[in-house]
Image (cartoon, helix red, strand yellow):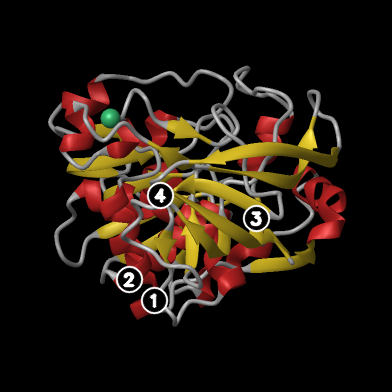
Amino acid sequence: MSITTINAYAVTHQGGPAEPFSYQKALGSNDVLVRVTHCSIARGDVQFIDNDWGDTRFPLVPGHEIVGVVEETGSAVTGVMAGDRVGIGYQQGACFSCEFCKDGNEQLCPKQKVIGVDCYGGLADYIGVDSRFAFPLPSQLDSAKATPLLSAGLTVYSAIVRAELRNGSDAAVLGVGGLGSLAVQFLRAMGHSVSAFSHSPAKREMIERLGAEHIDSSDPAVATALKRRFDFILSTLNTKFDLNAYLGMLKPQGKLCVVAQPLEMLSISVGLLYDNALRSIFGNYVGSRGQMMAMLVFAAEHNVESLVDVVPFTDVNQAIEMVRRGQTPARVVLQR
Ligand SMILES: [Zn+2]
């Protein structure tokens, strides 16, 4: 085991700035040391900085969508080699012996380690992680545009796979930010027809460019006009929305998946689930290692990539403010 000093940016208190911070990382036999070349600042990072969920541990080193190059490998590492370009997401560890890990659902492991709660993230020169959570990137993927795939991409891909849609399904995506824009692309590339709900007229052009139909979610006539229209609805909304209106837009046996959480409670009219409809609602949270590898291959084959604003690492605090104020429709990716 070797010990490495990592120079990072940390936030020491709720809502505070990112400041230089260093820590010692002990690398075990299964670990790799990765030189970080790209790290995104996602809405979720700002929510961690602002301690919106109440479980942030300070000092916090944010950053849970990371691309870098392997520099050192522990003695037991087999999957990656020094020099490999890898991606790292929100999860950095699992026990590999519980019932969920044995089923290949490491994201459900009760002993999992995730950035922001159990360990430090990618706003740093290096990151040391279990090599089983450092995924080689297919060569076709651009590092900056692929960075958001590591968490947002995995989350929506895994949600879509879990919905087990029939070929040529009618799908809808609620919210077309970092998660939603990738969801539209994955659904289109899988051969489904896609509608994207947004209250922002400015997003219409982007939505249509991605091959989806734009639907103005602020139009009160939409819920009636689209009754029983969709096989699948994926909600990426983190603000309060009318869950019942969208459940009503599902066909019988349709499924609604939520991958983000509004801070306020949503009410649900349970009759919409059983009354002559057999609809269901489920949640999704990142994805398994197997889904991560499949997602990266699929994204490379189908040119699924994120719209990104690339910013130098030294502008980290400006980048955080851009995201906090919602100043850019793109994902902000820091590049070294
Ligand atoms: Zn486990």
Q: Nearer the viewer, residue 167 or 19?
A: 19
For the residues bearing labels 2 and 3, Cβ distance under 8 angstroms: no
Disc 1: which residue: 300
Residue at 40 percent of width and 45 percent of height: 29
What amino acid is found at the position of numbered circle 3 in the picture? Ser
Q: Nearer the viewer, residue 336 or 52?
A: 336
Q: Which mark is residue 40?
A: 3
Answer above or below: position of 141 versus 75.
below
Relative side of 61 to 87, left or right: right
User: Split into 4 quadrants, where in the image is the C terminus?
Assistant: bottom right
What amino acid is found at the position of numbered circle 1 in the picture? Ala
Disc 2: which residue: 297
Relative side of 136 to 255, left or right: right
Residue 81: x %, y % from top left: 42, 67
CA gap, disc 2 to disc 3? 20 Å
> Which dot, 4 or 2, sits closer to the camera?
4
Q: Is residue 236 visible?
A: yes
Quarter, ligand 1: top left
What amino acid is found at the position of numbered circle 2 in the picture? Val
Residue at 43 percent of width and 78 percent of height: 303
Residue 85: x %, y % from top left: 50, 70
Mark 1 neighbour class, 10 Å CA radius: few under 14, some 14 to 19, many 20 or more:
some
Q: Which mark is residue 133?
A: 4
Element marked by disc 1: helix
For the residues bearing labels 2 and 1, Cβ distance under 8 angstroms: yes
CA gap, disc 1 to disc 4? 19 Å
CA gap, disc 2 to disc 1? 5 Å
> Which dot, 3 or 4, sits closer to the camera?
4
CA gap, disc 4 to disc 2? 16 Å
Q: Earlier in the sequence, mark 1 or mark 4?
A: 4
Q: Earlier in the sequence, mark 2 or mark 3?
A: 3
